[in-house]
Image (cartoon, helix red, strand yellow):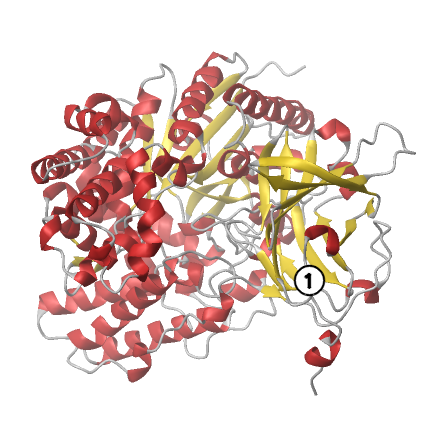
Amino acid sequence: MPTERLRVAILWHFHQPIYKDLLTEEYVMPWVRLHALKDYYDMGAILASVDGATATFNFVGSLLSQLDDYASGRAKDLFLSLTAKPADALDRDEQRFLLTNFFYINRKIIDGYPRFSELLARRKAALSARSPSRIFNKGDFLDLQVLFNLGWCGNTLRRENEVVKALHAKGRGFTEDEKLALLDEQQAFISRVVPLYSRLASTGSIELTTTPFYHPILPVLANVQNARECEPGVALPANWVGAMEDAKRQAGDAAELFAARYGVPLRGMWPAEGSVSQDTCGIYTDLGIKWIATDEVVLSNSLSACGMQNLRENRSQLYAPYFVEANGKKLTVFFRDHAVSDAIGFVYAPWDVDDAVTDFIARLRGIRDMASRGNDAQIDRIPEIVSVILDGENAWQYYADNGEPFLRSLYTRLVKTDWVELVTFGDYVERFGAGRRLCRLAAGSWIRGDFGVWIGHSEDNQAWDYVATAREALVKNPPSDRQARELAWRSLFAAEGSDWNWWYGDDHVCDNIDQFDRLFRKHIANVFTLIGRDPPFDLSVPIKKASSALHVRQPKELLHPVIDGKDTMYFEWLGAGVFDQRSAGRGAMHQVSTLVKRLYFGFDLKNLFIRVDFAQDAAELLDSGTDRELFVQVSEPSQYRMKIVTNRSSRDTIPSIDVLSQKNGEWQPVASLDSVAVGRVLEMAVPFQMLGCKPHDKIRFVVKVTKNGDVIETIPEGSSIETIVPGPDFEQEEWCV
């Protein structure tokens, strides 16, 4: 049995793109301010409340600069100004803005305020009316202004601030003075965020790090050919070739701002999206950076490139850092365990807190045992470390009480577990050295080990070519005025950030894609404006194509599959509709490890057919011993739920489908069907007649995987599959040359 403690390093990544139009200085989206109220302060305060807990907190440069604006009161934020504006002075367009945008908050929060729920119930009618004021009166709009801002208050504000507590208790009927008092308290609270982390870092409780300033994909920014190292066939932009000078400036500007704000040594950086390459390592070492981090798939590819066993052959190698040499200096690289990290980001939210933390520690125990056995064979024995790295702001809305009970329990139990030692990455390097030598660092990111989210799709490549065109124009025609010249370069650097291409292509969906698209093009247009040229006309045309919001291929012909759970005949599902779960993200986060890979759906004239392909055998994943179950939930034309009953206690047990319909708010049994098979894949058939469907009806459904009754994956996340029940002439209608 291993006797040495397992080191565990947790990094929480705080990031927001630059939502400010740098030319007008107007903020077009409010997410920096709102996450500062709900998440940033609370994350540090929770850790500080647990003696012995430590972690690394990463603040992106663009986030720090925007926090400064809000803390000082300089931010010109449309959401903020329309909150402050008297409700009876709102014009019709402003009323519609509030109705459209002031419900952007987790539904659990809305349901916690009866008045907020009441306003939501009337929202659609107000938006449909010629004048919203026919449905919403002055008091309604005033309450909406307050409740939106009140709902975004985090736990610290709700517990400690007297104004927030009083408004929370009141719940409705707010006054203009109460609204302005709330805004004053919120600004004061935001001003406490950076000092809190400075204090924690100065006492050694945490490590602080940053990311190249505007969160660019540094390898692609520096040299576009890095994209082909990890994805040889990827389509490259026509004009963008790379700009190493910009990559160096992005990292250098971030380090400079970090020093000004925190006054503590900058030992490490988290590259945006874990994006790394050998040729960008020197950027970090030239700044005195000792360590960076990325994903385990990059390590596996690097080991293979160096002629060593990759992680598929020896996974224990993941639990030690490695170093590469760049510009004559060593740069330590830590590699995140993405299953353990994703468990916090995507799995544990619906779980009981004790169960989630127990599962997390059990995963660590398994790693400790396995890594210790693997390390015994290493001549250069290095203390094992598990790198847990994830988004620190977007997951908590899915957790109970914004994740505070989970985080407090996680820290407490890790501190009390005698074979675990919480460490920061910088401290590990100082205590144990740079790690094992790696001949070179493979190019890649923490998503699939490549850069495919940000380059290759026609929309992504168009964005890169706009950057290339703007940069060329700026280099050739730099403004003579120093301030205008600096602003033009900052506008270009803002456009080089990763967030715009996160939403381009088919990878991710959100309600604000049009705003992201518009702001990216505005950053590019500002470059031309500042050099005294008219922006190209093409910049007035959206890059984002509406058709790519949810990439679902519709059925093209009637199907006749054999329901046997086998992935055998290619032609069985050839004409089916398809949704690829792994090509779809969860809004601002991206789940690397999903249970479901792909969903096929289709029909003959009598039945709906569904096939679910999992990352492993469906029979193993849905075995009764795993406590996992699969449901298909139909929401249109009527409410039905289909539960797959596997109960595989015996090999002779035949799975079945329990069909239930919703009546009077309760699920009532309709039938039990045997038209399902669970083997390598899951296949099922359900008669349209049983679902109350007739030809040409729209049918809408989702697939849900649960564990112990809690939903752990939904396909598709945040949306649904829609298709039309076929009529006798379906195949004639679908036929084309």
x then y, percent, for residue 67: 21, 44
The mark tally for this picture is 1
- Please tell me how crowded label 1 is: few (under 14), some (14-19), or many (20+) other residues with Cα within 10 Å: some
x then y, percent, for residue 401: 39, 27
Q: Is residue 684 left or right of residue 540?
A: right
Residue 429 or 417: which is nearer the viewer?
417
The residue to which callout 1 is attached is 694
Residue 382 or 655: which is nearer the viewer?
655
Image quarter (top left, top right, bottom left or bottom right) of the N terminus = top right
x then y, percent, for residue 296: 57, 43
**Could you say whether the residue bearing mark 1 is in a helix, strand or loop?**
loop
Q: Amino acid at mark 1?
A: Lys
Q: What residue is at 21 percent from the left and 71 percent from the top? A: 526
Q: Is residue 691 left or right of residue 76?
A: right
Q: Is residue 386 left or right of residue 172?
A: right
Q: Is residue 104 visible?
A: no
Q: Is residue 565 above or below residue 652?
A: below
- Residue furthest to the right: 652
Image quarter (top left, top right, bottom left or bottom right) of the C terminus = bottom right
Quarter-of-image position of residue 528:
bottom left
Q: Is residue 587 visible?
A: yes
Residue 44 or 170: which is nearer the viewer?
170
Q: What residue is at 60 percent from the left and 67 percent from the top? A: 232
Q: What residue is at 18 percent from the left and 55 percent from the top? A: 78
Q: Is residue 525 above or below residue 222?
A: below
Residue 363 or 37: which is nearer the viewer?
37
- Residue furthest to the front: 664
x then y, percent, for residue 708: 64, 28
